[in-house]
Amino acid sequence: MSLYAALFSGVSGLGAYSGALGIISDNITNVNTVGYKETRARFNTLVTESRSVTRYSPGGVQALPQNLISKQGLLQSSSSPTDLSIDGPGFFVVRSAPTANATDVSFTRAGSFVPDEDGFLRNTAGQYLLGFPLDSAGNTPPNRSVEELVPITISGLTGTAEATTEISPLRGNLRSSQPVSPQEATYNPAVPANNMDSGAVLPDFVRNIQVFDSLGTPHNITISALKSSVANQWHVEISAPDGVGIPPLSGNQIAVGTLAFNTDGSIDLTNTSASLQAPLNIDWTGAAADAANSQITINWGTDGDVDGFTQFDTPSTLISASVNGARFGNVNGVSIAEDGRVTALFDNGLTKEVYELPIAVFQNPDGLTRRQGNSFDLSDDSGEFTLQIAGDGGSGNVAPSTLEASTVDLAREFTELITTQRGFSASTKIITTADEMLDELNRLKR
């Protein structure tokens, strides 16, 4: 009988609108949840098949959830360098434990990561952020498979030192009107009694430059210059008090030669000794004997230009020496770039790329299965994922120091709440009306 069908149709309406209320309430309560993706209730008719064209058989309604996982949320600025969001498609790859099964991963847009007590980056749901470790050359594993992902840790990074390999550029000036010293007549860099390294000859210009060996130990190398009797030329000795040259020279000398200038005061590299332009080979001695030998190249400037060492009639001086390398330092923070590269920051000023964050991309992200902690799992509807470099292969860029806001529109949810309540009330009217009609039928036999 259609009355009973109408009764059950009203009951299906109560169930459908109750389910819709649950979806709306979940959206409203997660309005401030980072990376939350709203779900909408979509109603679907239930039709009771009937071959009659003269009679109608009521079916009812059901509420089905529609996941809007692919919808982009607003990116909000944050002061934390480990707060991350994705500007575009894709998901961060996370794991529930640092030692879990290598393929047991899930996916999230909730990027509020902070270091835990062990230095691992975890979000508010306790999930561990995963990335590819980089080798010494900054390369990721060749296969870029999910099995090669590791939890990103900060405290696990060791300190580092960097040996000096270049002084570039070395900027300074040697006074053109400097009188030629009487000692220049007997100057011989190979003879200790007649060179500047031993102190027997007083240089017209001398400066120390600090460099670092492979262990991060600082050393001074000394550049001494003596005006030559040949026009626009200077005798130069470079010495290392803590080392010797390779091959050995006189005393602590590591390089000797002539520095030449043009008549306009610019550097003349053509007539400058090749030994001064070649890498300085230094064998560290004494307390620094455990360090590897150093090779340091000095950039005296561009040939014929005044961007390095010059010879003008102003006081001889060392203007600047840009030296790479640094002493041993400990990790004091990280920075994350748009391409997902995680860089360790050391307190000695050095930086080192240590991880790369992959972005997981799906054919149908709206088909992912929701799980606790604002994360998602694979499903038959979502398809398989691919791990892309941020910004490539259809993936979005990593946005450091930002968080993705919830996609919930509160005004829309309140509107849906009102219409759902009205629909529920209307369904109850169906039940009470059908009940009254059935009661009338029962009273016919009286």
Image (cartoon, helix red, strand yellow):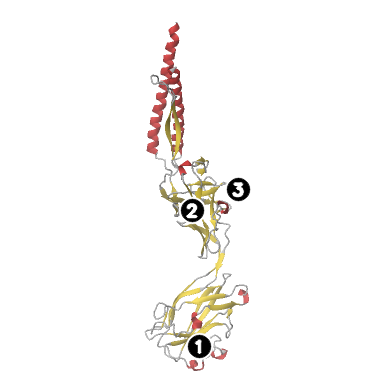
Q: Quadrant of residue 233?
A: bottom left
Residue 70: x and y in percent read 44, 44
Viewer-nearest residue: 158 or 262: 262
Viewer-nearest residue: 26 or 367: 367
Q: Is residue 359 left or right of residue 177?
A: right
Q: Is residue 157 visible?
A: yes
Residue 24: x and y in percent read 43, 35
Task: Give amino acid for label 1.
Answer: Leu
Residue that mark 3 sits on = 101
Label 3 residue SS: loop
Whole-angstrom CA distance, mark 1 to mark 2, is 63 Å
Which of discs 1 and 2 lies nearer the camera? The answer is 2
Residue that mark 2 sits on = 388
Residue that mark 1 sits on = 202
Residue 321: x and y in percent read 46, 75
Decide which of tag 1 and tag 2 comes sooner along the chain: 1
Which of discs 2 and 3 lies nearer the camera? The answer is 2
